[in-house]
């Protein structure tokens, strides 16, 4: 421990009172107390040195490289003091109420799970229906496209047949024109 340091108020009291207070103090309080006590002789390392100084007030501190080992002084006494605090009695009515509330929560969770299960089943059924409708639509679209392609090929074939059937028409039109011209001439002679 550091020599020439100020004695904290906890050390000025009796040993029993000091142990009781030591058991109740947090590490942060010890750190602040040790930092205030050794403010003039603060070691490099900042907060780590302050905490180590505070720990030295409560026991022995040993350092190995980056590790710091702490052994509390009067550990058995501190354990006895911490175990000696009385545990308040448990209220049976509060326990019954807690059990009843836990039962209600369990029932509500069961109902929620059933609701979620039903909702998931409905969503699954809807998804299956959508997928089947999509599949049927794709199949019928495929059939309709196939039928349309066949009809188009049939139309093209009929158009080619009509084109072949219409090939004599220009020659027939020439003959009709010739006949018309001949008729006009005959008509002109008859007048």
Image: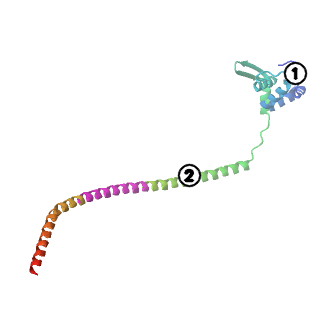
Q: Quadrant of the N terminus?
A: top right
Q: Looking at this view, is 136 or 155 the one in front?
A: 155
Tell me the residue at 73%/19% (across/down). Answer: 63
Q: Which mark is residue 5?
A: 1
Mark found first going from the N terminus, 1 or 2: 1
Measured Cα–Cα span from mark 1 to mark 2: 65 Å
Q: Is residue 101 left or right of residue 173?
A: right
Tell me the residue at 87%/21% (across/down). Answer: 5
Which range is magenta? 129-154
Quickly name the residue at label 2.
Answer: 113
Query: Badge 1 local density, few (<14 within 10 Å), some, or many (20+)?
Result: few
Q: Which mark is residue 66?
A: none
Q: Is residue 137 left or right of residue 5?
A: left
Tell me the residue at 15%/69% (across/down). Answer: 177
Circle 1 SS class: loop
Q: Quadrant of residue 137?
A: bottom left
Q: How many marks?
A: 2
Q: Position of residue 90 (x, y in %)?
A: 74, 44
Q: Is residue 188 left or right of residue 83?
A: left
As for residue 92 lying within the magenta part, the answer is no
């Amino acid at each position: 421990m550091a020599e020439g340091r100020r004695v904290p108020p906890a050390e000025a009291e009796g040993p029993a009172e000091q142990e009781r207070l030591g058991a109740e103090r947090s590490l942060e309080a010890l750190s602040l107390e040790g930092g205030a006590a050794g403010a003039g002789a603060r070691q490099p390392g900042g907060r780590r040195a302050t905490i180590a100084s505070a720990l030295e007030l409560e026991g022995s501190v040993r350092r190995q490289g980056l590790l710091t080992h702490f052994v509390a002084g009067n550990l058995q006494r501190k354990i006895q003091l911490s175990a000696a605090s009385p545990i308040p009695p448990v209220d049976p009515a509060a326990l019954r109420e807690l059990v009843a509330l836990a039962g209600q929560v369990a029932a509500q969770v069961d109902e929620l799970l059933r609701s979620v299960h039903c909702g998931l089943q409905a969503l699954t059924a809807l998804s299956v229906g959508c997928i089947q409708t999509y599949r049927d639509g794709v199949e019928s679209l495929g059939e309709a496209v196939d039928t349309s392609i066949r009809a188009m090929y049939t139309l093209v074939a009929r158009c080619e047949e009509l084109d072949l059937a219409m090939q004599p028409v220009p020659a027939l039109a020439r003959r009709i024109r010739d006949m018309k011209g001949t008729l006009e001439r005959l008509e002109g002679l008859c007048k």
